[in-house]
Image (cartoon, rainbow, N blue to C red):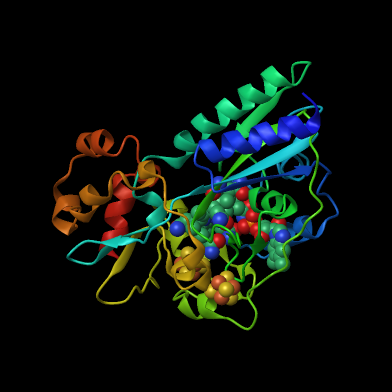
Amino acid sequence: MDQEELWNGIRTMSADLGFADCGCAQIVPLSGSAEEGRYLEAEQMGHFGKMDYLKRNVDKRMDPTLLLPGAKSVIVFLAPFGGKSIATEDGLKYSSYALGNDYHKVIKDKLYLIASFIGENCGQRKMSRVFTDSAPVMERAWAVRSGLGFIGKNNFLISPKAGIKNFIGIIITTAELPYPDKTVENRCGQCTRCLDACSRKALYAPFRVDASKCLSYKTIEEPLDEADKERTDNLDSKWIFGCDDCADACPWNRFNKPGWPEFSSNKKFLESCNRDFWSRITEDEFLQNFKDSPLLRAGLAKIRKNISR
Ligand code: B12
Ligand code: SF4
Ligand code: SF4
């Protein structure tokens, strides 16, 4: 297969597997780029909080050939999770990305099929690795470089075709592809809805997130022993896992594609997970009920703490 045929095959498979879009970019080291500048700025300003994994492997983050020697291309896929967050009748809110099966596995299973296709059809065997939120890869930066969209003032990769509620999946491969020469200009205009919606002021300026203040960090990533006396959700409702305020405020939601069913498979069950449920459930029951869910990452003790403060 020549490069064009290979790329057409990848695009067809991507659509057949339900991805909302895909794009590719030639690998060049990001060291010295604007993306690296913004990353190092965030680190130096202490915005990564206790997410120490962001401070490690910065060399790999800036150079995908350190993850796969000889890599030539990054292929980026958008997996729609669609939908809105949910709230229990007593006001506990769960983020829209967490209503189904763990997206890492769901997306990677599909990416492996595409990686096999690349290996089988390149003439000589090509190597590929698949990632989704699982390694030091600058996923949003590569999505932009692949021509899939622009970074909004809320930091999201926004696709003019497929909106804002999309996970990013990545294949890094030694195969070469016909790289499209397209960039999507920022289309936020004068809008500031996401900044206005962020109750924590974690979005402290357009395009700038202090992740250490973000409710997504607070409810999932922040170590349990970190006291957070300032936490003030509104009186009627409380984010228990993740936060959608800056995403839900965005007018680009109207371009969202329907989310994959796997990403909302626990919706009904979570709607019943109220304060009483969380006070009664045992550790074993939690592990059993949430073994395939993104909520497993936070753990029972953290979720209980999120409810109590
Ligand atoms: C750490 C992390 C977090 C942290 C920090 C987030 C942050 N904004 O930095 C926390 C826990 C807070 C978090 C929250 C969320 N996350 Co998160 N997170 C990540 C992770 C693992 C690394 C991100 C990172 O490196 N952050 C550091 C900052 C500095 O880098 P960045 O966000 O990638 O931003 C770069 C681009 O914007 C790039 N850039 C490229 N072109 C341009 C152009 C301009 C003009 C600008 C300004 C920037 C820019 O420059 C920046 C620095 O290089 C990625 C997966 C990955 N490996 O990339 C997922 C990821 C970013 N998260 C994701 C999701 C879904 C979320 C949540 C929506 C979950 C939720 N509902 O609670 C929230 C959204 C919060 C928000 N407003 O961003 C998705 C985003 C998908 C998308 N469409 O953008 C990702 C890509 C995971 C995935 N594979 O789908 N997350
Ligand atoms: S996810 Fe919530 S807390 Fe984090 S930046 Fe967006 S609105 Fe602010
Ligand atoms: S809410 Fe408005 S400013 Fe924020 S990302 Fe969406 S379009 Fe851009």
Q: Position of residue 52 (x, y in %)?
A: 59, 48
Q: Is residue 48 above or below residue 262?
A: below
Q: Is residue 56 left or right of residue 73?
A: left
The one nearer the camera, 229 or 252, is 252
On the rendered image, what quadrant is the C terminus found in? bottom left
User: Residue at the location (69% across, 35% down)?
Assistant: 8
Asked whether, in this view, residue 69 is left or right of residue 205, the answer is right
67 shown above or below 31: above
Res 66 → quadrant: top right
* Residue 111 drawn at (x, y percent): 57, 32
Question: Which residue shows up at 68% across the image and 48% down it?
Answer: 138
Which quarter of the figure is the N terminus placed in?
top right
Rendered location of residue 277, percent (x, y) = 16, 51
Q: Is residue 51 visible?
A: no
The quadrant of the rendered image in which ligand 1 is seen is: bottom right
Toward the viewer: 245 or 278?
Answer: 245
Asked whether the viewer can see residue 19, the reply is yes
Measuring from the top left, give residue 207's x and y in whole percent: 64, 70
Compared to 155, does 225 lie above or below?
A: above
| Left or right of 194 in this view: 37 | right
Q: Nearer the viewer, residue 177 or 203?
A: 177
Total count of labels: 0
Q: Where 200 falls versus 160 (above or below)?
A: below
Answer with the quarter of the image where residue 305 lies. bottom left
Q: Residue furthest bottom?
A: 190
